């Protein structure tokens, strides 16, 4: 059996089944954005780096409110949810310069939702050739940047863009 040394995953593995409540509601209430990698907080929604990314920059966009389907969002939440999706792409474009994206919702456990109770959309930056020999030969994905450095870059770019936006 092939082995990959990944000590950062122990926290995830040891918490499965032990944590009560919603992980997303918990990090919203925690108000420790840097620790939790929340790089944008809007009025009704937020964007956060995925702790277990498929690719560098894998982010999630979520409403603050604990709802499990798009049709349960208010019109205001829906507007901000999709606006923040676009803003997240803009930030990732500026910081990482991907050449494509996988963007998707997994609605319900049968569709692959790991957290089916709290609606979230995945934003996964992609580059030509980002699927190299490691996943094919070793079944291992290499993430090339630390989350702390990426968080700092996204937060800095978000602050810069906020200063440029005209006041309504």
Image (cartoon, rainbow, N blue to C red):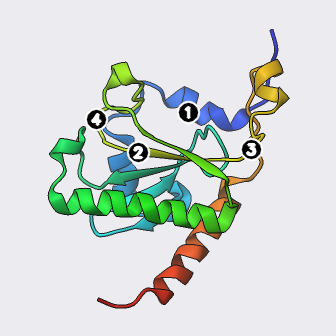
Q: CA distance from mark 1 to mark 2?
A: 20 Å
Q: Is residue 92 left or right of residue 20?
A: right
Q: Which marked residue is nearer to the observer: mark 1 or mark 2?
A: 2
Location of residue 94 in the rendering, given as x and y in whole percent from the top left corner: 63, 69
Q: Quadrant of the C terminus?
A: bottom left
Between disc 3 and disc 1, whose residue precedes? 1
First reached walking from the N terminus: tag 1 or tag 4: 1
In this view, the mark in front (1 or 4): 4
Among the two numbered marks 2 and 3 on one chain, the one whose residue lies closer to the N terminus:
2
x 55%, y 58%: residue:
35
Q: Which mark is residue 128?
A: 3
Q: CA distance from mark 3 to mark 4?
A: 34 Å
Q: Label 2 belongs to which residue?
A: 121
Which of the two discs, 2 and 3, sits closer to the camera?
3
Residue 15 appears at what percent x and percent y? 49, 31
Of mark 3 and mark 4, the one earlier in the sequence is 4
How far is disc 4 from disc 2 in space, using C-alphas? 13 Å
Residue 32 seen in the figure = no
Q: Which quarter of the rendered picture does the N terminus lie within?
A: top right
> How packed is label 3: few (under 14 Cα within 10 Å), some, or many (20 or more)?
few
Circles 3 and 4: CB distance less than 8 Å? no
What label sits on residue 34 in the rendered view? none
Left or right of 90? Residue 42 is left
Label 2 secondary element: strand
Whether 166 is drawn above or below 71: the answer is: below
Residue corresponding to mark 4: 117
Seen as rendered, the residue at the extreme bottom is 167
The residue labelled by disc 1 is 12
**Label 2, label 3: how many angstroms apart (C-alpha)?**
22 Å
Residue 37 higher or lower than 15, as above or below? below
Is 74 in front, or is 38? Answer: 74
Measured along the vertical axis of the image, is residue 13 above or below residue 72? above
């Amino acid at each position: 059996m092939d082995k990959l040394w990944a000590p950062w995953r122990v926290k995830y593995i040891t918490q499965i089944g032990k944590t009560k409540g919603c992980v997303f509601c918990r990090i919203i209430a925690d108000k420790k954005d840097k620790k939790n990698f929340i790089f944008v907080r809007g009025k009704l929604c937020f964007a956060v780096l995925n702790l277990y990314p498929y690719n560098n920059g894998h982010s999630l966009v979520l409403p603050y409110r604990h709802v499990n389907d798009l049709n349960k969002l208010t019109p205001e939440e829906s507007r901000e949810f999709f606006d923040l999706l676009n803003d997240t792409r803009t930030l990732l474009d500026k910081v990482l310069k991907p050449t494509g994206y996988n963007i998707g919702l997994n609605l319900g456990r049968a569709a692959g939702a790991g957290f089916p109770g709290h609606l979230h959309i995945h934003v996964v930056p992609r580059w030509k050739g980002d699927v190299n020999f490691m996943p094919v030969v070793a079944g291992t994905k290499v993430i090339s940047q630390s989350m702390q450095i990426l968080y700092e870059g996204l937060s800095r770019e978000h602050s810069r863009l906020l200063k440029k936006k005209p006041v309504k």
